[in-house]
Image (cartoon, grey):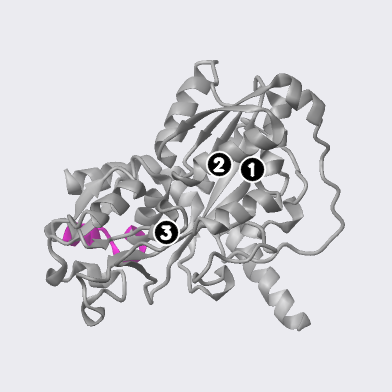
Amino acid sequence: MICGRLLAAALSLAAASLGLWAVPQPAQAQAFTPDKVDRAAAVKEGNLNWYTSTPFPLVQKLVDRFEADTGIKVQLLRSGGEAVIRRFLQEYQAGQPGADVITMSDAGAANGMTRQGIFVPFLPEGFDKVIDGGKEPHGHWVAHRVHLIGMPVRTDRVADAERPKTWSDLTDARFKGKMVMADPSFTAIQLIVVGTLSQKLGWNFYRDLRKNDTMIVQGHQQIYKTMQQGERLIGAEGSDPRSFNNGSPVPNQSMIYPTEGSFIIVSPTAIIKNARHPNAAKLFAEWMIAPLAQTIIAENAIHASRVDVVPPKDMPALRDVKFLPIDLAQIETKGRELKLKFNEIFQ
């Protein structure tokens, strides 16, 4: 047992040194003292500006419940992860940050902004319960949700024997005109997928998807709608369709988790330095990883980031998933190059 723990620790340290995000591990039990939140000051501020990539309808459920619990009003800007980052940085660099709190799906970008001193370190109650891969050690960001990314499929239109089993299978000519995927310039989840698969399979993988007439849409909500309408039958990447349907089963849609490995992608939440509503921001960040909010997330077919919250119904626990390691350093430093290459292929 001791040897196993030492090996796990060594692998985690090696991955961190290489800029890789390893499989999420349960937070290690140790003494933890959370930072204090001045709830009275937060309520007095009365408002909060949240920029987020959290999908509908989950995002509205969280906002409505937070407002009901605290009396603090949330001004919401919701878009794809890359669009959210772009909007926030434009405002921040102009000296007019509009967000008090930002949630994205690009941990590489979050690490970069941490190094730039954009975020306030904050260790909320429950921080020690979040998976190790889902938080910056000093509290500059902490994930409130974890996306398990595979390939959604229309089960009524694609027989089990005909479905792709690996990412590489998507290049087969039998899938021509049947696939849809998101634009990495809009959603950070797809940027991570493109960055990883272009490394693992080469850019010819995406050239072959282009030859297969793969439809490009803005984000994952559009993938879900396109498949629901029957325009396309397979998501060349995507999350569980239930996450766009109040957590309820979607008739004739299911998930394929490729044998090569799926993607486990965390969504960092961070408090902006010099935020106009700093106390409300801290209360919100703490509320988002409290058991109530984490349970709401799991009920909407998205994994919570806390290890003590059960996985979404009929979905595997993160520890049981074969995953593809993500090179966050590559995503951070070559993000623009990845988007340009992808757009060059699919233009």
Q: Secondary structure at mark 2?
A: helix
User: x, y (%) of residue 121?
Assistant: 72, 37
* Proximity of marks 1 and 2: CB atoms separated by less than 8 Å: yes
Which residue is painted at 78% across and 81% down in the image?
2
Side of 46 relative to 238 (left or right): right
- What crowding class fits label 1: few (fewer than 14 Cα within 10 Å), some (14-19), or many (20 or more)? many
Give amino acid for label 2.
Answer: Ala
- What crowding class fits label 2: few (fewer than 14 Cα within 10 Å), some (14-19), or many (20 or more)? many
- What crowding class fits label 3: few (fewer than 14 Cα within 10 Å), some (14-19), or many (20 or more)? many
* Proximity of marks 2 and 3: CB atoms separated by less than 8 Å: no
Give amino acid for label 3.
Answer: Arg
The residue to which callout 1 is attached is 141
Give amino acid for label 1.
Answer: Trp
Region in magenta? 198-208
User: x, y (%) of residue 327?
Assistant: 48, 57
- Image vertical order of residue 51 relative to residue 166, above or below: above
Which residue is painted at 23% across and 68% down in the image?
170
Rendered-image quadrant of the N terminus = bottom right
Q: Nearer the viewer, mark 2 or mark 3?
A: 3
Residue 303 shows in the view? yes
Q: Nearer the viewer, mark 1 or mark 3?
A: 3
- Image vertical order of residue 91 relative to residue 212, above or below: above
The residue to which callout 2 is attached is 110
